[in-house]
Image (cartoon, rainbow, N blue to C red):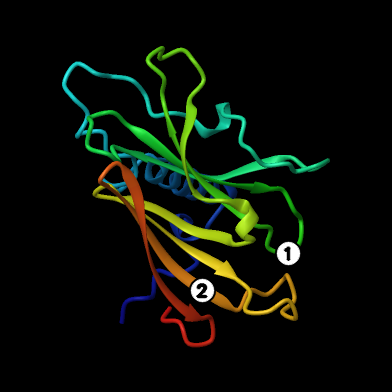
Amino acid sequence: MQPLAGQDLSHTQPRPMHWLATATAVAAVVAAASFVQPPDATANTASAKPGRSAPAPDARAVTFPLDCGPNRLDVVKQVSGDLDGDGTVETVATVRCHSDTGTPPGGVYVLARTSDAKATPRIVATLLDPSRKLSVQGLALHDGTVSATLLGYSTTDVPRCCPDVRTDTKWRWRGGKFLRTDDQAALGTAPV
């Protein structure tokens, strides 16, 4: 009978150099994976007119009509695409006052570039005014339709930490303005 080749062979005993080589290989794989993105990970600007290369308006460059007092304004999310079919890229941004606790109300704004590409983008529409006291989640843009989930409160007795009304909302440009459609449900019964 032939003896087993276990711990007696030098290549079967892991040494610090083996662990270092393994860690380096794992780090290389993780780094390479960070460069791989799904095809829909960036804004679709394919609908822009040929010859136009103006970038999407950046929400961080805009002064929003929201008084946050001593707190900073947070641009929670921004998505870009051609909303009105004119071949230029607009940006939809969700903004709110910064808060470490609770669910602060948010606003949803449409931004466009002025004719001077170096100028600050401007707000061209307010889809959701922060005075409505709704929180915004899941802002998305698909085929010119803006969608978001709005969270609110059924009564003033509901704690401000825990919204109990969920409204799935969509806005679409029609006839020179944004039209809104809602699908409202209580959070306890809303589909996940």
The residue sitting at the right extreme is 70
Report crowding for label 2: few under 14, some 14 to 19, many 20 or more residues within 10 A (C-alpha). Answer: many
Q: Quadrant of residue 115?
A: top left
Residue placed farthest to the bottom in the image? 189
Q: Mark 2 falls on what kind of element?
A: strand
Q: Is residue 121 left or right of residue 85?
A: right
Q: Mark 1 or mark 2: name the one nearer the start of the chain.
A: 1
* Neighbourhood count class around disc 1 (C-alpha, 10 Å): few under 14, some 14–19, many 20 upward: few
Q: Which numbered marker is on residue 166?
A: 2
Q: Nearer the viewer, residue 100 or 114?
A: 114
Q: Residue most toward the left? A: 50
Q: Residue at 63% of width from left, 38% of height from top? A: 65
* Residue located at (73% from left, 76% from top): 156
Tell me whether circle 1 and circle 2 mark residues in contact (CB < 8 Å). no
Q: Answer with left or right where residue 73 lies relative to residue 29.
A: right
Q: Is residue 2 left or right of residue 148?
A: left
Residue type, numbered disc 1: Gly
Query: Measuring 73% from the left and 70% from the top, which residue is drawn there?
Result: 160
The quarter of the image holding the N terminus is bottom left
Residue 117 in percent (x, y) is at 40, 14
Relative to 174, residue 2 above or below: below
Q: Nearer the viewer, mark 1 or mark 2?
A: 2
Q: Secondary structure at mark 1?
A: loop
Q: CA distance from mark 1 to mark 2?
A: 16 Å
Identify residue for label 1: 102
Residue 94, percent from left and from top? 53, 47
Q: Nearer the viewer, residue 3 or 11?
A: 11
The image quarter in which residue 88 lies: top left
